[in-house]
Each structure stands twice: as structure tokens, then as C-alpha cells.
Image (cartoon, grey):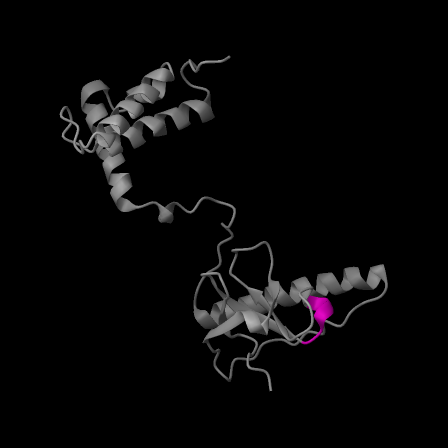
């Protein structure tokens, strides 16, 4: 009897994500990882599609209710190219259907944002320090003054001055009473905007 079931929540050895088992198989041609039982696991958008993982690399996190019925699917190998194409199409339909059942069971929504930057990873402390620096700049120069662009060496030099002051043991900028590192982040953020939007003048040294 398999130690895993379809619908189980599992973790993958060496990874932090939790995935859902969509299919079980003892066919090594399915998983490409070698002989042994394997599971087709969906990590909710962390990868481009569900992937086969050996049982030995999985750990059970949570088990689906016994009365939750999931569709069956035959993952037997196909010999002809046309059969393989049909099998792939059927597999995709099965995965979408199974994911929808699991979503309804877990009462969670689906959002395909795996290719977008996860801004929730940004630390609150760094964002606040940078925001304080921008607020200080607003008082001195106007809210969106920096968006007009400037010579690139100016915010670069400012960032280096604040980093150097921090390196010399000074945490707080005397002019703004804000974090030196926050000001450095703000200056670098300006440079990123200038670089990506083509603002200001690129005054970097060119050999």
C-alpha cells in the first residue's frame, strides 16, 4: 500500500514549498528520475507545471479528506506521436480539473503570478528606512523632483557617501535624522528608475 495518496500535501526534500499530489505512479518513464515510486506534485504556480518526484524525496504534511473524490487518469505510455500528443492534451485537462477540485476543497483561489516579482518578500524595516529618505527629499525638493532625472553620478555619489558614513560607524544622517542605509537605498532606487526609464544623463565613466 502506498505511503502517499492523491490530494496529499507534501514537502520536497531541500525545498520550502508545499505541494499537492495529483497522481501516483510506479512507472519510471513518468518521472525521469530512475526506478521507484513517484508522485506528480503541483506546487501552486512555483514551477511551470506539475513535476514528478520520487517518494523518497517527499514528506507528508497534510492528508485530503477520505470522502473527497478526484478524477482518475491513465498515464500509460503512448508509442505513436499522435497518441503522445493526445495523451498530453488529456493529461493537461486532467491536471486542470484536479487542481480545481483541490482548490474548492482547500477554499483558496488561483492566481497565475509566478513570473512576477514577489514584493511581499521585501523587509518592512528596509522599506520604511527608504520611504523616510524619500519623505525627506520631498520636503527639500518636492514630491516627484527625482523623477525629472539628473546626472547619474549624483545619486550614485550620494549612495556611496551614506554607505561610507555607515561603514565609519555612523548610523543616522545628521541632516535628515534618518538612516544612512535608508538614504543609500533611496539613491540606488532613483538610479534603477533612471536606468530602466532612460531618465537623466548617464555620466558613468566609459573606457
Of residues 108 and 186, the one nearer the viewer is 186
State the extent of the magenta-drawn residues as a range. Answer: 26-30
Looking at the rendering, in which quadrant would you find the N terminus? bottom right
**Residue 33: % across, % down:** 66, 65
Q: Quadrant of residue 85?
A: bottom right
Tell me: 172 left or right of 203: left
Q: How would you classify the magenta stretch by its main secondary structure?
A: helix
> Residue 187, image x and y in percent?
31, 26
Residue drawn at (40%, 15%), measured in percent from left and top? 200
Q: Is residue 151 above or below residue 45?
A: above
Q: For the view shown, which residue lies furthest in the bottom direction?
A: 1
Q: Quick check: can you spot residue 109?
A: yes
Does 88 sit left or right of 176 as displayed?
Answer: right
191 magenta-colored? no
Instruction: Give the total number of marks visible in the rendering.
Output: 0
Residue lying at the far right of the rendered structure: 80
Residue at 28 percent of width and 40 percent of height: 127
Which residue corresponds to the image point at 25% horizontal and 29% vertical from the top-left? 183
Q: Is residue 170 left or right of residue 5?
A: left
Image coordinates for residue 107, horizontal then vertical, percent: 43, 68
From where the camera sits, is residue 149 visible? no
In the depicted view, which residue is nearer to us: 132 or 73? 132
Viewer-proximal residue among 72 and 57: 57
Query: Looking at the image, is 32 positioned above or below residue 133?
Result: below
The image shows residue 171 at horizontal and vertical percentages of 18, 34
Amino acid at each position: 500500500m502506498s505511503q502517499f495518496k492523491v490530494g496529499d500535501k507534501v514537502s520536497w526534500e531541500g525545498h520550502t514549498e508545499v505541494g499537492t499530489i495529483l497522481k501516483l505512479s510506479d512507472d519510471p518513464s513518468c518521472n525521469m528520475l530512475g526506478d521507484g515510486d513517484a508522485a506528480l506534485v503541483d506546487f501552486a504556480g512555483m514551477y511551470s507545471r506539475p513535476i514528478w518526484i520520487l517518494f523518497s524525496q517527499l514528506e507528508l504534511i497534510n492528508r485530503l479528506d477520505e470522502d473527497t473524490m478526484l478524477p482518475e487518469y491513465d498515464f500509460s505510455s503512448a508509442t505513436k506521436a499522435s497518441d503522445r500528443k493526445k495523451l498530453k492534451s488529456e493529461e493537461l485537462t486532467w491536471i486542470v480539473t484536479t487542481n480545481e477540485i483541490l482548490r474548492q476543497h482547500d477554499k483558496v483561489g488561483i492566481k497565475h503570478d509566478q513570473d512576477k516579482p514577489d514584493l511581499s518578500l521585501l523587509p518592512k524595516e528596509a522599506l520604511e528606512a527608504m520611504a523616510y529618505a524619500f519623505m525627506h527629499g520631498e520636503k527639500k525638493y518636492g514630491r516627484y523632483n527625482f523623477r525629472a532625472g539628473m546626472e547619474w553620478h549624483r545619486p550614485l555619489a550620494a549612495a556611496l557617501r551614506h554607505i561610507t558614513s555607515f561603514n565609519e560607524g555612523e548610523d543616522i544622517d545628521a541632516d535628515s535624522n534618518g538612516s544612512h542605509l535608508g538614504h543609500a537605498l533611496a539613491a540606488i532606487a532613483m538610479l534603477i528608475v533612471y536606468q530602466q526609464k532612460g531618465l537623466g544623463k548617464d555620466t558613468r565613466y566609459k573606457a
